[in-house]
Image: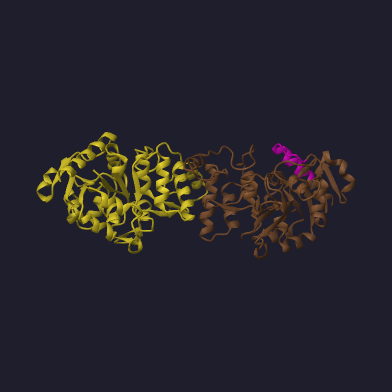
Chain colours: A brown, B yellow
Amino acid sequence: MKIVAFAGGVGGAKLADGLAQLMRSNDLTIVVNTGDDFEHLGLYISPDLDTVCYMLAGLANQDTGWGRDGDTFHVLEQLHKIGGPTWFRLGDQDLATHIERTRRLKIGQPLSQITHDFCRIWNVQHAIIPMTDQAVSTMVNTIEDGELAFQEYFVHRNCEPKVKGFRFAGIESALPAPGVMDSINKADAVILCPSNPWVSIDPILAFPVIRSALKAKCVVAISPIISGHAVKGPAAKMYIEMGILPSAVAIAQHYNELLSGFVMDASDVNLSLDITIPFVATKTLMKTKDDRRCLAEDVLNLIQHL
Amino acid sequence: MKIVAFAGGVGGAKLADGLAQLMRSNDLTIVVNTGDDFEHLGLYISPDLDTVCYMLAGLANQDTGWGRDGDTFHVLEQLHKIGGPTWFRLGDQDLATHIERTRRLKIGQPLSQITHDFCRIWNVQHAIIPMTDQAVSTMVNTIEDGELAFQEYFVHRNCEPKVKGFRFAGIESALPAPGVMDSINKADAVILCPSNPWVSIDPILAFPVIRSALKAKCVVAISPIISGHAVKGPAAKMYIEMGILPSAVAIAQHYNELLSGFVMDASDVNLSLDITIPFVATKTLMKTKDDRRCLAEDVLNLIQHL
């Protein structure tokens, strides 16, 4: 069975890791959101891509959900001393990724090629592809502060401004990166990982050519909302601010006509009557590496029965 | 007595530190070569400026002559792993300087202002000014490889290509940084530190307005050549390749009509007959912080007697 998984931040990276534990390298492609990418300190930073790559490489910091395990912060400590901006936490080893990626982008290499090369060096067995090699930027439309670039909203403003919508700047002229459409077309199913629908999965679905291709596919989403709360990040807060009760039902309705199947947490089984497509209710919280594999098994089993 | 010192790399930084040990902060200005500055990994790197600033701040690595004392190389180690260029050795703490300087240059702040601010944070008491806020690049004309940018010649090619001349690209349209001409005009004497004449001091002297101003001044040079050898770096090699015997005499002749006085090493006293201006022969090798102060004392004494 060939699978494409769409992933954003930590939740997506964890399920991708679960799938990678179960699947042969040729059978799994992970397409990663790059709408959060931004330039900081002159460096091109791709947070979701790094989270997924570090996770599958076994380099991720499991405590923070971002950055690398055992990283140091010598550069940032000195940057602080000389008055530089330190609101975006960059470890020393992590910085090397950004420095080398930025150097290679500046000499014209595409992000997908650089990601492929880094993954090879990091011994990542499965394909990880950024959704696009062009600039697509998630803009957060807020009630009181107007439109904010994603990292400004997410890290600098700590998700405090109330949101009323999102825009993916540059989507009109961007193309899916090489390999994305091919892997979708060859896939038996597409998995929408338990990432924030608004800012992690929607940017990928915002490519008309991707959305069209999904209509003919078996698509399964995993709810990132458990018992009305996001495991991490502002997904639940965003739903509330836009007048939607955050729940597994809201997630299923979010993706609506795309879905062939749905996975929600066992604790949300009381919502079963409102889920109108085949679903499983299982343990979706992934605390351990085994949890990731178990959830991936449940998702693959559902797909096989659809 | 008010003094301006022109300085390049390690030798210049050491004498500047000796002068700083003896002089009040208002009485000493150090003008630093920026002809070696270059962009690397997207960062604006100013090696001589950093060497002088770190030295006077007590942050310099005394063993290497470049970088910071006790620095780590976590970023560079990772950069090596992912195939990035590591020929220019950048420590983690040192990187913060380059990252923040680059960030501030990109938003339009002049190098002299940034240097001033960094020095304030590092508790440097005396004024350190880059020779210019504009781009002036030392180009090394080599016999076999044509013209090379300075760091390409110096670090990447390890000074191996034979030189036949130098050019300071951009000098025509560049101006001395704010404070440079004012400090020269107010100075009782200008000291040409024991730095490489070709690539550390000549770039500063290449500004016509500086060279003119020096004609009316008491100018004293300290030979960076001791017993025919440079303490560090390629100065002696450069003299040989250009058909000049490297010696204290060659240094005095290099600066020629600018000089009012000269300081050479005691071991070169046999050359006295060929020095046609007032000079002292003393210990010029600066191994310790006391050595720096002693040499500075000798230089200031000579100036007072001129």
Residue A202 is situated, as x and y percent measured from the top left of the image, at: 72, 55
In screen coordinates, is A107 left or right of A30?
A: left
Can residue B125 be seen from the camera position used here?
yes
Q: Which residue sits furthest left?
A: B273
Marks counted in the figure total: 0
Whether A296 is among the magenta residues is: yes
- Could you tell me what secondary structure mostly forms the magenta stretch? helix
Q: Which residue sits furthest bottom?
A: A173
Identify the image quadrant of the N terminus of chain B.
top left
In screen coordinates, is A84 left or right of A238?
A: left
Residue A15 is situated, as x and y percent measured from the top left of the image, at: 72, 45
Along the viewing direction, whichever of B127 and B53 lies nearer the viewer: B127
Residue A161 is situated, as x and y percent measured from the top left of the image, at: 68, 48
In screen coordinates, is A258 left or right of A66?
A: right
Can residue B169 be seen from the camera position used here?
no
Residue B283 is situated, as x and y percent measured from the top left of the image, at: 20, 38
Q: Residue at x 37, y 37 (%)?
A: B58
In screen coordinates, is A122 left or right of B108?
A: right
The range drawn in magenta is A284-298
Whether A53 is among the magenta residues is: no
Q: Quadrant of residue A289?
A: top right
